[in-house]
């Protein structure tokens, strides 16, 4: 079973965290995607944490997890904090395969999305 | 002349600001877009500022500017700080039409972009 975990920074502002949850709902609603489950986790300031988000997917049967950093820039959070959190999880759950993708800011689809919004 | 201004938060980390500038290069390189010029500005911590970014486009001949908040969440920066900066510019340059789009996090293209990255 393959699952996707959308990892956002997390905010003290609940509405910002809800925006991420709503985005996950929209991803779930996309046709023809390959994931049995799609979850959300937050690096800080909101719940579930990355550990909790990964564990929730495993509890739902995930054996393969794609972790997507919903971040615009490849700063310390993307380069260090998220990989460390996932390494910590993998040390405890070596049977679960977790792959981290590039961060959103590196998406080849962004330039087109930006022009689409501005049209 | 119609121009696009990509407004990012700005970071103390120069590489993060450069990511935004490179993204603007990629937007400029998209085929068939409607903009004579595409600029970048930063709300804080980096230059040019929003005022400077708007002024640079006007200096290049812009009469219509689309301002795009490159932000994931509709927090205070998107709801208040960016509109205020643009209102300040418009008060000084009433002949220039500036329209602010939704922020990136509200893009209908994001769910597909996320699935594309994670594939």
Image (spheres, coloured by chain):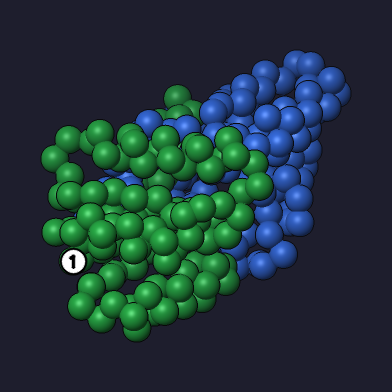
Chain colours: A green, B blue
Q: Around disc 1, counting alpha carbons within 10 Å, would you say few (fewer than 14), some (14 to 19), or many (20 or more)?
A: some
Query: A9 left or right of A59?
Result: right
Examine the image and state in which quarter residue B57 appears: top right
From this view, report whether residue A50 is shown above or below residue B39. below
A69 or A46, which is in the foreground? Answer: A46
Instruction: Give the number of marks.
Output: 1
Placement of A102 over or under B9, stated as above or below: below
Q: Residue furthest front?
A: A59
Q: Which residue is mark 1?
A: A63
Where does the image place residue A18, in percent across and percent down from the top left? 50, 37
Quadrant for the C terminus of chain A in the image = top left
Q: Disc 1: which chain?
A: A
Residue B69 appearing in the image:
no
Relative image position of residue A57 (x, y in whole percent): 28, 57
On the image, the x and y values in percent for residue A2 come to 18, 58
Residue at 68% x, 30% y: name it: B79
Foreground residue among A114 and A48 = A48
Q: Residue at x 40, y 50 (%)?
A: A40
Where is residue B10, by image quadrant?
bottom right
**Is residue A94 in view?**
yes
Q: What residue lies at 28% left-to-right and 70% top-to-bottom?
A: A98
Q: Residue at x 65, y 37 (%)?
A: B75
Report the quarter where the N terminus of chain A lies. Answer: bottom left
């Amino acid at each position: 079973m393959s699952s996707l975990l959308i990892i956002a920074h997390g905010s003290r502002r609940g509405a910002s965290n809800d925006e991420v949850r709503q985005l996950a709902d929209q991803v779930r609603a996309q046709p023809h995607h390959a994931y049995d489950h799609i979850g959300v986790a937050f690096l800080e300031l909101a719940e579930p944490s990355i550990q909790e988000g990964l564990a929730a997917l495993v509890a739902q049967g995930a054996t393969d997890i794609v972790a997507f950093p919903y971040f615009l820039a490849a700063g310390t959070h993307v380069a260090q904090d998220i990989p460390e959190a996932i390494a910590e999880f993998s040390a405890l759950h070596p049977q679960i395969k977790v792959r981290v993708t590039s961060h959103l800011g590196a998406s080849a689809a962004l330039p087109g999305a930006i022009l689409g919004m501005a049209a």
